[in-house]
Image (cartoon, rainbow, N blue to C red):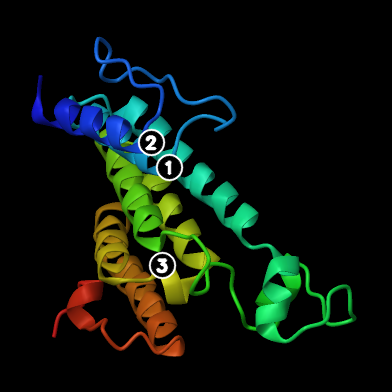
């Protein structure tokens, strides 16, 4: 088997899903998982990507993003977190999901299961797969949408560099330069000090 397929086999065994050794890329999963574990979806997408099956790869990367979003929503149990935050159960301070964001606290805080690196990897790979199928505008949209969700979490060196590369490919130089400078200003607004001009493909 190719290395990617072997890696997927090992991952399926480790996660103890409904593993079928005769079908290494079988989409079978455990009952009630509503598709697949996000990590498995990324692995499957990578297998298809390595085979040049970019449409299938995009499908699995999208499934990973959706799966991680659902896990995030399920993990943020406000009732269970209230005691740790010093809030009274059912009190007036009980916040809904929108309240968390309005209060400046985002889901995925320490102790709650959320894998930002997995989301970034899936979105980056999905954008690249879209580029390989001549969907340049879609590739741009994927990364822009991701960063808009939470710039502090998702605007990193990888997403900044890839998005700015896509701007260079999809826009006139003057337009691309303006978009890259806007993205750089967003990084400054959120105090993302690890990003520099090179991250945005801006000449020194």
Label 1: which secondary element:
helix
Asked whether, in this view, residue 89 is left or right of residue 49, the answer is right
Asked where in the image residue 119 lies, by quadrant, the reply is bottom left
Q: Is residue 198 above or below residue 4?
A: below
Q: Which residue is mark 2?
A: 41
| Residue pictured at 22% horizontal, 32% vertical | 10
Side of 153 where 157 appears, left or right: left
Residue 98 seen: yes
Q: Check if mark 1's residue and mark 2's residue have beta carbons within 8 Å.
A: yes
* Pointer 2 with pointer 3, Cβ within 8 A: no
Please give the residue where the numbered disc 1 appears in the rendered image.
38
SS under mark 3: helix
- For marks 1 and 3 on the same chain, the one whose residue lies earlier in the sequence: 1
Q: Position of residue 30 (x, y in %)?
A: 49, 26
Q: CA distance from mark 1 to mark 2?
A: 5 Å
Q: What is the distance, in whole Å, between disc 2 and disc 3 at their CAs?
A: 20 Å
Where is 50 relative to 124, above or below?
above
- Residue at 49 percent of width and 60 percent of height: 113
Q: Is residue 86 left or right of residue 193?
A: right
Residue 162, position in %: x, y?
26, 59
């Amino acid at each position: 088997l190719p290395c990617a397929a072997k890696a997927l086999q090992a991952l399926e065994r480790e996660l103890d899903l409904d593993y079928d050794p005769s079908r290494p890329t079988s989409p079978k999963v455990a009952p009630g998982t509503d598709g697949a574990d996000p990590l498995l979806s990324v692995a499957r997408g990578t297998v298809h990507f390595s085979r040049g099956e970019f449409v299938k790869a995009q499908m699995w990367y999208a499934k990973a993003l959706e799966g991680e979003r659902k896990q995030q929503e399920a993990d943020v149990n406000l009732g269970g977190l209230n005691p740790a935050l010093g809030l009274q159960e059912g009190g007036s301070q009980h916040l809904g999901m929108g309240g968390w964001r309005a209060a400046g606290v985002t889901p995925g805080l320490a102790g709650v299961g959320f894998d930002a690196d997995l989301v970034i990897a899936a979105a980056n790979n999905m954008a690249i797969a879209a580029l390989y199928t001549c969907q340049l505008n879609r590739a741009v949209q994927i990364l822009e949408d991701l960063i808009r969700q939470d710039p502090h979490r998702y605007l990193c060196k990888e997403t900044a560099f890839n998005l700015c590369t896509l701007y260079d490919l999809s826009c006139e130089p003057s337009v691309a330069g303006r978009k890259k400078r806007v993205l750089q200003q967003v990084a400054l607004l959120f105090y993302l000090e690890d990003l520099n001009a090179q991250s945005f493909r801006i000449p020194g």
